[in-house]
């Protein structure tokens, strides 16, 4: 038994979530190998070889891997799959796009988005946006698994000394072409990975009033979220939506402002480590999941909150 | 051009789900069901493409028990031309769903297959990619914009870092993100008309697909409950707690 993990990278750097997935993989089996498919990514291969727990790096290099296209990755993975019991990647847009295409080729029923390794074939995974946890056992001979990165600590990026071996590229898939990638250039952290998230709901009453949220977000170096109600009302764009139909976030601190706490919103944030709710309706369901609830008018509370934060000089960037 | 759109019947996104007492699954009896939200976006996009004169026929397909037909009827009411209901009971894993869809694609020969990026019940996010693999077609997942060109689609995809654009040759599979469009509501006259639109029925067995689950669902539990929190009196107390008790700022 051994695990083949598909690395996510941009040919220059390993994506940090790969470290979390390496940790999960080594819990499945100590013999964890990482497959790096890229172009001129020698520095990435080297950094993976130094990650604690990695036993071997298989480095496949070809110009066709300049940009990530799942259809090009899959033949390489299949070529290498034979020697492994498990194929693993992150349950983010990289792995979600890739792994099912691998699994179907192997006639394997994939286990998506695991949050705990119970044994080599049994895993815990959230369903219904985290409103229930399912314990599932896969009986397929080759197991395809995606891992929720935020549920595992990152493996230490040093301490390993894995050998790096060269692998053969696969055939190019000509029917899909990469055109461009527009990375959102923002000084603000990404909603999915931010340490602090502050979200606004219908209580904000207008897009103009979201400035109050933005000001606090700037101060805390937080990502900005929103409830579906706020998005539907047009206060803010949908990419900020937290909830069952938006993003699921697990920050250290989640601040819900003017959000009543509809089920669909709670599903997207209730695993956050610390939850703050600011709402003028003391009966709002959001208070049932909040560690700290403040029953107050947000239009008074938010400026005060900013003022209090300004008094502190210890905000971590 | 012909577009096949796959839709799934799930518990409505506004319903608080309940775990069965014997931990064997989720209670679905007497619970409000709806179309999986991003599947509505898939139908909407197909209808828009047809309205723009770039598609000639939209076929909506669902897999499930008798009641799953409601999902197809809803698709017919917002603009699909005909429906297919593949009867199957119990948990149908994405691998089996994609095998059923493959069999239907081979019969129907659509140019495009659309579906939601993920179902909000099992949260698997697999079916579109698996179908693309089985057909060896290109896949454009998490689509937030689709430009129909002559023999290809230019698709903007929602990825973690931002937006990615790819070009896929037709035939192709597209899985739709909620950002793709704003699904329309069915008007009453259209709901009535939809009842007269053709709806074919077949079973997974007719299509030669084994739908027995490969994954054993050992148990389903409620997630650990959060400890009850406290109410703070004012903003100063809140900031003090966050700094000195929770130590998160």
Image (cartoon, rainbow, N blue to C red):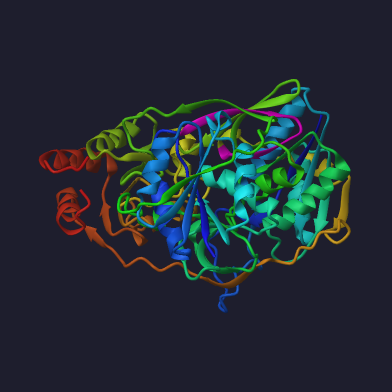
Is most of the magenta stretch helix, strand or loop?
Answer: strand
Q: Is residue A246 above or below residue B207?
A: above
Where, by quadrant of the figure, is residue B46 drawn? top right
Place of residue B161 in the rendered image (x, y in percent of width and height, measured from the top left) = 45, 35
* B109 or A296, nearer to the observer: B109
Q: Is residue A284 above or below residue A28?
A: above
Place of residue B94 in the rendered image (x, y in percent of width and height, measured from the top left) = 68, 55
Residue visible at 22% across and 52% down in the picture: B248
**Whether residue A261 is visible:** no
Place of residue B58 in the rendered image (x, y in percent of width and height, measured from the top left) = 80, 36
Left or right of B64, for residue B36 = left
Q: Is residue B212 above or below residue A190?
A: below
Residue visible at 45% across and 50% down in the picture: A248
Question: Is residue B169 shown in magenta?
Answer: yes
Place of residue A157 in the rendered image (x, y in percent of width and height, measured from the top left) = 32, 49
Residue visible at 35% across and 56% down in the picture: A153
Q: Quadrant of the N terminus of chain B?
A: top right
- How many marks the image carries: the answer is 0
**Which stretch appears magenta?**
B161-178
* A130 or B11, nearer to the observer: A130
**Whether residue B166 is visible:** yes
Question: Is residue B97 shown in magenta?
Answer: no
* A111 or A71, nearer to the observer: A71
Where, by quadrant of the figure, is residue A282 drawn? bottom left
Residue furthest out toward the bottom = B22
């Amino acid at each position: 038994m051994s695990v083949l993990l598909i690395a996510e990278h941009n040919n220059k750097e390993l994506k940090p979530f790969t470290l979390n997935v390496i940790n999960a993989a080594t819990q499945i089996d100590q013999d964890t190998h990482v497959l790096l498919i890229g172009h001129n990514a020698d520095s990435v291969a080297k950094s993976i070889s130094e990650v604690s727990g990695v036993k071997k790096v298989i480095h496949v290099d070809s110009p066709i891997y300049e940009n990530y296209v799942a259809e090009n990755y899959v033949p390489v993975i299949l070529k290498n799959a034979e020697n492994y019991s498990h194929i693993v990647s992150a349950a983010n847009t990289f792995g979600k796009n890739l792994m099912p295409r691998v699994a179907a080729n192997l006639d394997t029923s994939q286990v998506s988005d695991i949050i705990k390794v119970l044994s080599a074939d049994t895993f815990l995974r959230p369903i219904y946006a985290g409103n229930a946890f399912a314990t599932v056992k896969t009986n397929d001979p080759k197991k395809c698994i995606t891992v929720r990165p935020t549920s595992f600590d990152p493996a230490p990026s040093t301490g390993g000394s894995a050998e790096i071996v060269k692998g053969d590229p696969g055939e190019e898939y000509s029917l899909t072409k990469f055109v461009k990638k527009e990375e959102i250039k923002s000084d603000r952290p990404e909603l999915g990975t931010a340490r602090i998230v502050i979200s606004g709901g219908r209580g904000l009453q207008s897009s103009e009033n979201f400035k109050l949220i933005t000001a606090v977000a700037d101060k805390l170096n937080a990502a900005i979220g929103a409830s579906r109600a706020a998005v539907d009302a047009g206060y803010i764009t949908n990419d900020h939506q937290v909830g069952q139909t938006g993003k699921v976030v697990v920050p250290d601190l989640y601040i819900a402002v003017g959000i009543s706490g509809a089920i669909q919103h709670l599903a997207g944030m209730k695993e956050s480590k610390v939850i703050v709710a600011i709402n003028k309706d003391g009966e709002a369901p959001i208070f049932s999941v909040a560690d700290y609830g403040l029953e107050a008018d947000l239009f008074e509370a938010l400026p005060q909150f900013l003022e209090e934060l300004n008094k502190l000089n210890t905000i971590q960037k | 051009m012909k577009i096949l759109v796959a839709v799934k019947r799930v518990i409505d996104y506004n319903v608080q789900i309940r775990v069965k007492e014997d931990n064997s699954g989720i209670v679905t009896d007497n619970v409000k069901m709806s179309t999986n939200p991003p599947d509505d976006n898939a139908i909407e996009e197909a209808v828009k493409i047809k309205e723009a004169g770039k598609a000639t026929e939209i076929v909506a397909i669902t897999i499930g028990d008798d009641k799953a037909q409601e999902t197809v009827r809803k698709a017919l009411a917002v603009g699909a031309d005909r429906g297919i209901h593949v009867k199957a009971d119990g948990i149908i894993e994405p691998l089996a769903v994609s095998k059923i869809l493959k069999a239907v694609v081979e019969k129907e020969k659509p140019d495009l297959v659309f579906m939601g990026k993920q179902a909000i019940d099992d949260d698997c996010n697999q079916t579109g990619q698996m179908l693309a693999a089985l057909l060896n077609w290109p896949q454009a997942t998490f689509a937030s914009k689709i430009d129909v060109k002559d023999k290809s689609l230019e698709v903007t995809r929602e990825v973690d870092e931002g937006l990615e654009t790819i070009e896929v040759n037709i035939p192709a599979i597209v899985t739709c993100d909620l950002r793709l469009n704003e699904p329309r509501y069915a008007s009453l006259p259209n709901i009535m008309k939809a009842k007269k639109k053709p709806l074919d029925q077949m079973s997974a067995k007719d299509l030669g697909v084994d739908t027995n689950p490969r994954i054993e669902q050992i148990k389903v539990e409620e997630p650990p409950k959060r400890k009850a929190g406290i109410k703070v009196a004012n903003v100063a107390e809140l900031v003090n707690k966050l700094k000195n008790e929770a130590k998160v700022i």
